[in-house]
Amino acid sequence: MFNPLRPSGGSGSIERLRVLADEELMQLVYRSSADAFEVIYDRHADAAFSLAYRMCAQRALAEDVVQEAFLSLWRSRARYDRNRGSVRTWVLGIVHNRAIDALRRRTVRDKGIVNDEGLEERVAAPERTELDVARREEAREIRDALDELPEEQSKVIELAYFGGMTHVQIASMLDVPVGTIKGRMRLGLAKMRMALGDPTEMVQ
Amino acid sequence: MSGEDFPMDPGLCGDNAAPYVLGALAEEEHEAFRRHLDSCAVCREEVAALQVVASVLPAIAPQRSAPQELKRNVMASVREDARREEELGHHMIAATRTHFARRSQLAWPRWRPLLASGALATVVAVLVIAIASGGGGASTRVIRAEATPRGADALLHVSDGRAQLDVSGMPQTPPQRVYEVWVKRSGAPQPTDALFTVTAHGDATVGVPGSVRGVKVIMVTSEPLGGSKVPTTSPVIIARL
């Protein structure tokens, strides 16, 4: 009888692993199952690439970020702790950190680089499942919560999270004190939390 | 959410919680605040409250399909890693079996259930150490590396031109940093793809990519995520072959 938690090979094993939850797959990934990791990749690669592209605004750089992030995830797989959040949160956290590193390196090394977002056709990830539809709906709620903030608060959150800028850089750009920037970030996030109810219950 | 859910006016130290969860602190500030969290319950609570919002922000990025080529590249590296780990494990088990068969016909069956349970890395480490202490006969060489952090230990297992590093008691790497393995033949240390972090207990098992024939030193440094092309910190582990 097939036991999906026992590592196995063969062409059908990946398909059979797709019934497992992320946390169960991580047990196999921990034991070096590349097949289980492939399922994790398939589930979260679009979200990872979307985040990286939103931050880097450059396809090639976004690809580098996602590739580095997933390889780092594989090589540090023993570090995953389900008590600290979902696999998706873990994946996107690493992608975010990698993208910040890439952006800050690029800022120093290559200020003349041209963003290509908008220059190429955007290929939207299709809605394939009910989960995808639920995620789209939640994304709209989150977007609304951000848009409802005073512009000065939403702007600093976007510049920091998606722009990879430090609070000092943002303060310099907007010509306001650092303490003000920190306060706007905190107020904005606090209001978003109130608007979203309990974000931890989102499907993500 | 009630007002009590959100700690207000946490004091000056709490000012960094929001930029921390948004990734907006410079690297040194980030690390300093992370250390501060170990001792400040107010800031931990503040970070936890804000982190749940930061963690849903990726959802508002316009959704795109990841390129197929990206998957091919990632999975090719992952499968190569997995194959190498399996190969290294087999080398060591083979060497171990030979050795134990010589030393005692009774010793081996005691280990077999453990191997079958999937605790391969741990058992391999234990068995190889046993080989080293027993001396002679096996093709696996075990080298105790110099480990700088207090309480840390590192053993390098070399078998048939391949090497695996087992570390224990190592400190956690700060966020956005990893340990990187370097090999030195002659001249400057060369970077490898082996980037790793350690478990909550400070343990890790990492295969050294490629053949180690001709390698004189294998060392480990702490580097930014993604690794570095040249070491940017002093080695925390040095194994001399």
Image (cartoon, coloured by chain):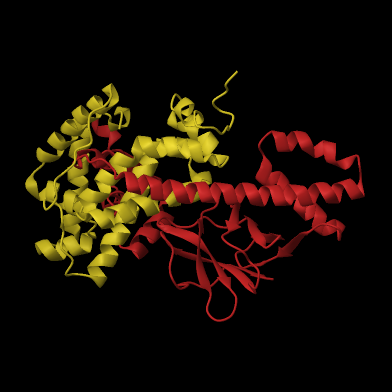
- Residue B25 visible in rendering: no
Q: Identify the residue at image location x=20%, y=39%.
A: B60
Quarter of the image with the C terminus of chain B in it: bottom right
Q: Position of residue B107 (x, y in %)?
A: 87, 42
**Nearer to the camera, A30 or A6:** A6
- Determine the residue positioned at 19% across, 58% down: A179
Q: Is residue A141 visible?
A: yes
Vertical relation: A191 (above or below) B168: above
Kindly indicate which chain is depicted in red in the rendered structure. Answer: B
Residue A2 position (above or below residue B147): above
Rendered view: B55 above or below B157: above
- Percent x, y of residue A72: 44, 52
Residue B3, image x and y in percent?
24, 33
Instruction: Identify the image quadrant of the N terminus of chain B.
Output: top left
Q: Tell me: A103 left or right of B142.
A: left
**Is B191 left or right of A180, judged from the image as shown?**
right
Name the residue at the front extreme. Answer: A11
